[in-house]
Amino acid sequence: MPHIDKYPAGAFVWIELGTTDQAAAKSFYGSLFGWNANDMPMGPGEYYTIFRLEERDTAAAYTLNPERSGGAPPHWMPYISVASADDAAARAAQVGGKVLSPPFDVYNAGRMAVVQDPTGATFCLWQPGANQGIGIAGVDGTLCWADLMTTDAPRARQFYADLFGWEIALGQNDPSGYLHIKNGETFIGGVPPVGPQPGVPPHWLLYFLASDCDGAAAKAKSLGANIHYGPTTMEGVGRWAVVADPQGAVFAIFQPK
């Protein structure tokens, strides 16, 4: 159960759920992953939920505001660590991305920006301040991987390499066409050879660790989720399933080999 106190630049450092029913989301993820919810006021009638495992931050949630979200459906959003949100946002625009929200301070927690890559997938830049990000890994219910679901892998590959210095390459002895994302010496995600389903825009699919994928998927279904895919086995890698929570936010459950 490694505790994490600091991240290198280019790492997935935080994850955030935008949902239409925050109370229901707290109940669902609390039951599924054992997350404890800590609510922080954001303004009149609004609050930001920080989920915790073993007294360490693991994720967050907020209620989507139709006026501010542009009608976006419920979704999970990854944050990527950078030394300077301003420099990274400027660089993202230079290499073909679109800055949806220019850099701004989040109290003393850090500084962030929202960026869309050239293929349409959205993520956040995070320059840590008092909040370094997710504080725990390696236990059930923690982020363990992220896949970029895109219709233009070569363009995305160039963009993220230019922006974060990621090495994005085929795996050894892997004929599938799956690209592995390596940040420094650490593998953090991938780009599948098949993009999102028709009608679904490019996006990041976040994976949560489970010691029993089938059991977690069955529990998610009993709590009102829809199972989009699996559980299925990836030979030599592990077992996984793609799930939509009761409000429609999609994520994956992964049980390592």
Image (spheres, helix red, strand yellow):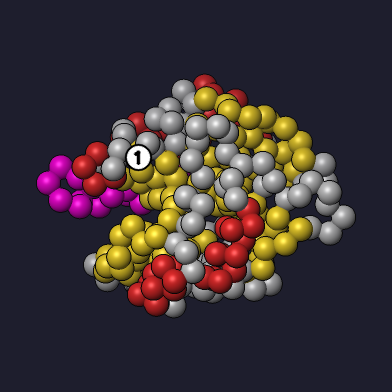
State the extent of the magenta-drawn residues as a range.
Answer: 33-51
Amino acid type, mark 1: Ala
**Furthest residue toward left:** 44
Residue at 67 percent of width and 29 percent of height: 230
On the image, the x and y values in percent for residue 212 come to 67, 36
Residue 46 sits in quarter: top left
What is the chief secondary structure element of the magenta stretch? Answer: strand
* Magenta stretch: includes residue 119: no
**How many other residues sit within 10 Å of disc 1, few (<14), some (14-19) or many (≥20)?**
few
Which residue lies under the disc numbered 1?
Answer: 72
On the image, the x and y values in percent for residue 151 come to 59, 45
Above or below, 67 against 105 in this view is above
- 252 to the left or right of 236: left
Q: Is residue 256 in sight in this rendering? A: yes
* Residue 61 locus on image (x, y percent): 35, 46
Of residue 1 and residue 236, the one placed in the foreground of this image is: 236
